[in-house]
Amino acid sequence: MNATKALDPLDPAHMMSLRHWENPVDHNELSSMDSEAIVDCGWGRLIFGQTFADPQMLAEVICREQPGRRDIALYLRDPQVVVSFAPQELFIDPSFTFRLALAQALDVAKNNAWIVRNARAEDAAAIRRIYQARQMVLPNRNFFAGLDKRDEIDMLVAEDSDGRSILGVVTGVDHVRAFHDPDGGASLWALAVDAQCSHPGIGEALVRALAGLFRERGRRFLDLSVLHDNNQAISLYEKLGFARVPVYCVKNKNPINEALFLGPDPASDLNVYARIIVREARRRGIGVEVLDAAHGFFRLHLGGRSITCRESLSELTSAIAMSRCDDKRVTLKVLAQTGIAVPEQVEADDPETVADFVAKHGRVVVKPARGEQGQGVRVDLCSMDEVRGAIEAARHFCDNVIVEQMVAGDDLRIIVIDHQVVAAATRRPATVVGDGSTALRRLIEKQSRRRELATAGESHIPIDDETLRCLRAQGYELDDVPPSGARILARKTANLHTGGTIHDVTPALHPALREAAERASRALEIPVVGFDFMVTAPDREEYVVIEANERPGLANHEPQPTAARFIDLLFPQTRAATRDESERRMNAT
C-alpha cells in the first residue's frame, strides 16, 4: 500500500481541531457545543464521540442501531474503552481518517460534460441505484424528501450536461450546524460514482465542490473516512491535499460490516462472478469450499446436499443444455423451432454463399460458432473485404465461423433463472468523451483503467485492429484529439469484457420480451442462462435473440437479486427466509 502522510502534530490548526477528542471532555467545553450529537445520514447515524462525556453511554447509543442501517461513531477519544463496554457488538473500524485544511481553496475545474448541483428529491431513484450497485446502504426515500430542510447535511450530485443521468453523489455534514462544533469542522461521506460512467474525474469534481462549499461557509477542515486498503481512493485524497489524522471509528458487528471484522474472506481469490454467489451462500449459512479460484470453481454444501459450480454454471445445467448454448448455430436452430425470433445466418465455408448473404443483408456480423466474451466477433461489416478479414480473424478462436444478419437496435441481456426472468440490462459499447486536449489513445487507456477498477479487472478496452476500424469509421485515428464533449465509440460490440457498460432496465422490460426469454430457456432446457436480445427498445415488443450464454455474469446485474435467485435454485430450502428478509428491507426503504 502507498505510504500516507500525516499532519504535522505541531501545526496550530491541527492542534485546535483535535483538542476535543485528544483531551478529556469537561463541562466548560461541552457548554459550547451540543452534547450527545447525532446526525441521521439516511444510511445510518453519524455519532460524534467528542460530544459524549460518558464512554459507556456512547457504547449504548451505538448499539441502538436500527436493522439494515450502518451507524458510524467518529472522534472517540478512547475507542478501545467504548468497545470494552460491548465487545460482542462493537469493533474498531479498520479505516483511516483523512483531513483537508480549508485555508486554501481547491480549484474547481470546469467541464462541459457535467454539472455539480445540490441533490433534489426527484434524484432519489438514481442515487439509490448508484449506491446499490456499489453495495452501499441505501438511504430511505423519505430521507431525500426532507433534504431541503436539513441545514446540517449537504448532498451534491454530478449530473450529465444533457440532464438525463446522475453520474455521482457525495454527502457532506456541517459540524457547526449539527452541534455547534467549536473546531469549525465538516466531513465527507458516501462518495459514489456510477460504475458505468464514461466521464473521468467525477469523484474528484464532487470532492472539490464539497470542499469549496464548506470553505465558503467558513469551515476550517473537511474530514473523511476510507478503508485502509482502498488504495485508489487514498491516492485521490492525497492528490487533493488530504492527510492522515489519528481519528478512529467504531461500528456495530452487523451483517453489513461482516467483511470488516470477520477477517479474510475465503472467496477473496475468486473472480467477481464467483464471489457474488459465494457471499450470498455464506450469508445463508451454506458451506463453501473453493476448488479452483483461478477458474472460478467452488463447491456449496448444506445438510446432505452438495453442488459444484463454476461461477453461475452448476451441476444442474446438463451437458446437453450446455452444448446447445455453446454452439451458436445450434442455439438459433433450437430457438427458431419454438417460434423465437432469430436472425438469419450462414456458415462461412463457401465464399459464394457468403457473398450472396452480404449482398442480401447489406450489413452483417461475423463471429466464431463457439466462444465467449466477444472474442473474434466483428460487427457492422458491409464489404466483402471486411467480411473476409473478419472470417480469418474469427478462425483464430474457432474453426467454424458464422456470418449473421446484423439487426440494429439496443443490445439487451436478459438473465433467466429457474425459467423466470430475474434481470434485464442494456449493454452499450465502450465510449470515450473528448476533452479538447487529450488524444484518443490516452482517452481509451484511461477509460479502460476505470472499467477495470469498476469490474474487478473483468472489463477493459483493447486497442487492436477492431478498435482502429471503429475509430476510422468515425473519421479518427488513435493520435487524433477529439473536440470537447464529443462521444467517440471505441468498439462496435457492447460486450462487457471489451469495455462495454451495462444499465439495468428490468422494471421497464416489455412483457413480450419477458415471455420470449422464459420460453427460450425452456426450449434449451437450461436452468440458468443469459440471453442476448437485439431490441428496438426494452419497453417495446420487437426483438431477435442472437445468443445464449450458459454461464452469465450475475455480478453485472445489480441491483437485481441474481445471486439470491441462483442460490434459491440450488438450495430451495433457504428461499423463504431470504425472501422474507428481502421484502422486509424493501418495505423499510
Image (cartoon, grey):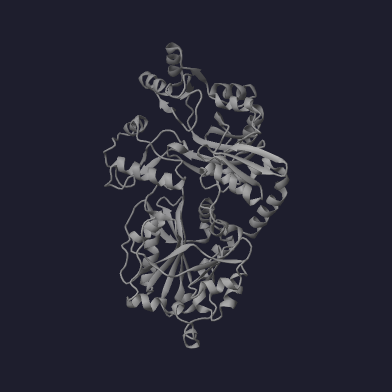
Number of marks present in the image shown = 0
> Residue sitting at 46 percent across and 21 percent down?
361
**Of residues 7 and 110, which is closer to you in this image?**
7
Indicate the position of residue 290 as horizontal and vertical percent values.
Answer: 57, 42
Above or below, 523 against 441 in this view is above
Report whether 2 appears left or right of 290: left
Question: Can residue 252 be seen?
Answer: yes
The answer to whether residue 14 is above or below residue 270 is below
Q: Nearer the viewer, residue 174 or 355?
A: 174
Q: Position of residue 228 (x, y in %)?
A: 45, 59
Q: In which quadrant will I find the N terminus?
A: bottom left
**Snapshot quadrant of residue 414:** top right
Q: Is residue 425 above or below residue 382?
A: below
Residue 507 shows up from this direction: no
From the viewer's side, name the closer residue of 422 and 374: 374
- Could you say where residue 102 lies in the image, as x and y percent from the top left? 34, 70
For residue 462, side relative to residue 361 (left or right) = left
| Residue depicted at 51% across the width and 64% down the height | 93
**Placement of the C terminus among the 4 image quadrants:** bottom right
Residue at the location (48% across, 22% down)? 404
Residue 90 spot, x, y in % from top left:
58, 67
Q: Quadrant of residue 395?
A: top left
Q: Residue at x 48, y 19 (%)?
A: 400
Q: Is residue 507 left or right of residue 353?
A: right
Q: Residue extending furthest bottom?
A: 28
